[in-house]
Image (spheres, rainbow, N blue to C red):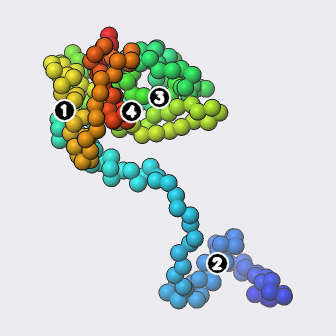
Amino acid sequence: VENFNHIISVVVPWWRDDVQAEVDLFEEVAKSIGYGEMPETLPALPPSDTKAHQLLPSFMNLRTVLSGAGADEIMTYSFVSKKDLEHSLSDESKCLQIENPLSSEQDYLRTNMMASHLRVAEKNYQIKQSAGVYEIARVYEKTGKSAAESWKLSIMVWGDDSLLRLKGLIDVVLGSYGTDFDVRRDLNCKLFVPNRSAVIGGGIGSFGQVNP
């Protein structure tokens, strides 16, 4: 080690091929001084928004509540077809199209989970005529030249008294958070049967009987 006017020049011995970069020298100095002798200083980091992994405990609690209420958790693909968008009345202009889809059934990223869950109900109805399923997953939406990604909860129930059972699961979810949102009838949603749908809390969610 040589010091030239506060500029340190270091020659690495030929047998230390593990020292390749500046950070390796920092590690050697730290080991020479002793890690226990180095001052403890927290880095100056600005406050950050909630990260996805910080939501995981809340998601686990939500899964426990819904599974305890008798619903089954499912996992579906985030990719949907153009026909799926039409069935779920999704706005195609807000959907992200895949440049190289594996098949025509996976042309777009979904903006909601309606089409995916309708397919689950269709495939499982002959096996189980009455059931309730839920999924916590990301949905995607085009915003100008960029895209927005958000977490959503979707619940689907089929069979006898399905709408009442769905409302019961929603009440269980809201009750687990100690909230009591207003529920009002939705008269403008074409996706659901007229007079058989509602909006929760001014727009945080909606539910109803799917219009065939």
Could you say where residue 202 lies in the image, as x and y percent from the top left? 37, 33
Residue beneath the point at 24% across and 48% down:
178
- As measured in the structure, the alpha-carbon distance from the residue carrying label 2 to the one carrying label 4 is 54 Å
Measured as percent of width and height from the top left, residue 62 is found at 28, 44
Residue 192 in sight from this viewpoint: yes
Residue 48 coordinates in the image, percent (x, y): 52, 58
Q: Which mark is residue 26?
A: 2
Where does label 3 land, which residue?
111
Mark 1 Cα shell of 10 Å, populated few (<14), some (14-19), many (≥20)? few
Farthest left residue? Answer: 160
Q: Which mark is residue 203?
A: 4
Depth order, front residue of 26/165 = 165
Amino acid carrying label 3: it is Thr
Q: Secondary structure at mark 2?
A: helix
Quadrant in which the N terminus is drawn: bottom right
Q: Is residue 10 left or right of residue 149?
A: right
Label 3 secondary element: loop
Residue under pointer 1: 168
Q: Which mark is residue 45?
A: none
Of circles 4 and 1, the one toward us is 4
Q: Is there CB contact under 8 Å for labels 3 and 4?
A: no
Q: Nearer the viewer, mark 2 or mark 4?
A: 4
Q: Residue at x 26, y 44 (%)?
A: 179
Image location of residue 167, percent across then percent down: 22, 29
> Residue flagged by tag 1: what amino acid is it?
Gly
Cβ atoms under marks 2 and 3 closer than 8 Å: no
Is residue 113 shown left or right of residue 37?
left
| Quadrant position of the C terminus in the picture | top left
Whichever of callouts 2 and 4 sits on the residue coming sooner in the sequence is 2
In the rendered structure, which amino acid carries the disc numbered 4? Gly
Per the model, the C-alpha gap separating discs 4 and 1 is 19 Å
Near mark 2 (Cα within 10 A), the count class, few <14, some 14-19 or many ≥20, is few
